[in-house]
Amino acid sequence: MEKPRVLLVFPPQWTPLNPHFALAALNGHLRERGHEVKLLDLNVRYYRRVLTRKYLEFSLAKARNAIQHLMPKTLLNLRLGERTARTDRENVRLLQIEQVLAQDNRRTLEDIDEAVSVFDDPEKFYDPIQLTWAYVTVDRALDIASLPYWPIRVRFNDLVIPRLPLTVEAVKAFATNRDENPYLTYFEAQLAEIQAYRPDVIGISINAHAQLVPGLTLAWLLRRRGTAHVTLGGNHLIRIKEGVLRSPEFLTSFAHSVILGEGETPLDGLLHALEHGHDLSRVPGLVYADPDEKPVYTFECSGLSLNSRALPSLEGLPLADYFSPEPVLTIRSSKGCYWKKCTFCDTDYGVCPDNRSVENLVDEMQALQEKWGVSDYCFIDECIVPRYMERVVDCIEQRGLKVHWYGNGRLETSFTTQRLDRLRQGGLTMLLWGLESGSDRIMKLINKGIKLDKRLEILKNSSDSGIWNFCYIFFGFPSETEEEGLQTIEMIESNTDIIHSYGRSVFTLNKHAKLHTDPSTLGILEMVGDPEELSANLDYRVSDEGAKQRARKLAQLCKFRCALAYGDPLWMHLRYREVMHLYLKRHGRDFVANYRFDPAAKAARLGLSPDGPTLVGIDNP
């Protein structure tokens, strides 16, 4: 067999702003080794397809057909007095579709093409009113696109599938459900192009929960209709390793193999084995089915060192299709977290810690700028050592590069005023900080290692240096009281001058979090098994029965109180960190911090009442 032809596919759902790190990294790696590679970003292609007037008209027609199908069933159920979960769901679905169809959707159909053009046009994109209008129009369009598949809702940054258990059996059934799966027909329309390429190996990247169901739908189709070896990989799969290994049906349904962990070395081994007819047991980091169709995991794979990796390649990616006038590429200087002590965190699971030389990192920046004109970067490190950041800035300046960047920082005293000034001068626009909670007791349980007054002092120094501070917070850490949750809200409200924006969430227990070592100290009475083998999270029971509901209420309270505290700021409308970075680069921090929408101008563009409620930013912009 000749060298295998490789097709790398990135499925929905992922925010379609920029090329994903996995595609570019594996593309560069395989091309350097002489493989013929084709990339297929079906995620951005999906959004370009549905966000058109033609598709929205088709979607509305399909929704009308759904009513014709549901109406007689609903009437019959009422006459017979039949009341089940299925009939209730059909009744609500009928009502929801009728309500949307009763609205005047003409404006969305008329505006959608212009709205999409805002993301392609720098002049429109960097106009806050234009961009906000485009976001709102896209939201409305995706409501229409999702309508025939209700209760499924496709979002620009998420996929909502209520009541679908993340089990192999449930996902397999959903993959074939034409009434509710919005991706099945779309993927079937891509099969001719995929088969025309004649790939020997198809790799599908599944990096988060929102990609799981679409990715497995595509895998199910390819597993049955093609001759290629289908292999799955991505960050989400390493987190559900145990579920994959205990489910023979996962492989027989969705793939010939699964790569667990970093993909380069296992993919090399897989391609070599297929080319030479070798047993897959020799391939590191691989799950495959034995002759009895039982999953077999080969052996751990340490992965390539960061310094020995090939440069990422954007060759074959549809760069003009991403919803941003300028690409913001992800880049990595280290693997793993140098702190490694936060009890809620599982980011180190399956990761081989490594650090990259400054010169090697800046080589990548320089190569991407010279070949592709890329000048903006998002560091995906869990956190970067402050001294390392400063050395990167020194090297960037020595090379004469003009780049801007942002990334995660850990709140610690080595972020001195002098160092922060230096980072800002070297192109840093924004730092993403794990502020987490306003309660020192909760922070001690989380094991952040720094008290509130010191955290706020670092944020002030960062703000004084001209850096934008984005802070993560969350509610509902086990044993958190209502008073402690309110302390977190008050921390944000009282420090809007140095906490320039924030992202809030409600605590979820990851399967591999360090918290598992002694959960009883936090009032956790019981881990509720692992009923959903494809979920990265676990359910748990605590002594305080109202704790989870209280956390959700606190998160909602935070949303509204902090919206008032910030006074309808621009950042709440920018929504995404990449977009905030671009606005900070283009307009400067003071513009983003101080800009306020003229009520009349915003109302006229968005079709809202000037005296109506403001738009409230999403949880994690």
Image (cartoon, rainbow, N blue to C red):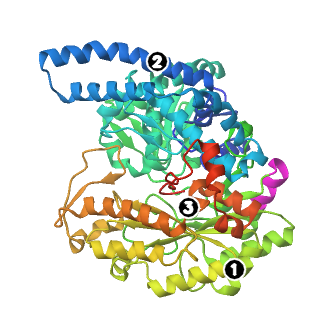
Mark toward the start of the polypeptide (3 vs 2): 2
Crowd around label 3: few <14 · some 14–19 · many ≥20 (10 Å): some
Q: Main secondary structure of the magenta part?
A: helix
Looking at the rendering, which quadrant does residue 496 occupy?
bottom right
Label 1's element? loop
**Foreground residue among 104 and 469:** 104
Mark toward the start of the polypeptide (2 vs 1): 2
Contact between labelled residues 2 and 3, with CB atoms less than 8 Å apart: no
Question: Was residue 178 drawn as part of the magenta stretch in this picture?
Answer: no
Residue beneath disc 2: 62
* Residue 445: % across, % down: 33, 77
Residue beneath disc 1: 465
Label 3's element? loop
* For residue 92, above or below residue 29: above
Residue 280 in view here: yes
- Amino acid type of the residue that numbered disc 2 sits on in the rendered structure: Lys
- Amino acid type of the residue that numbered disc 3 sits on in the rendered structure: Asp
**What residue lies at 44% left-to-right and 68% top-to-bottom?**
473
* Residue 117: % across, % down: 71, 37
Span colored in magenta: 363-373
Residue 480 in view here: no
**Foreground residue among 292 and 84:** 84
Spatial separation of the CA atoms under disc 3 and disc 2: 38 Å
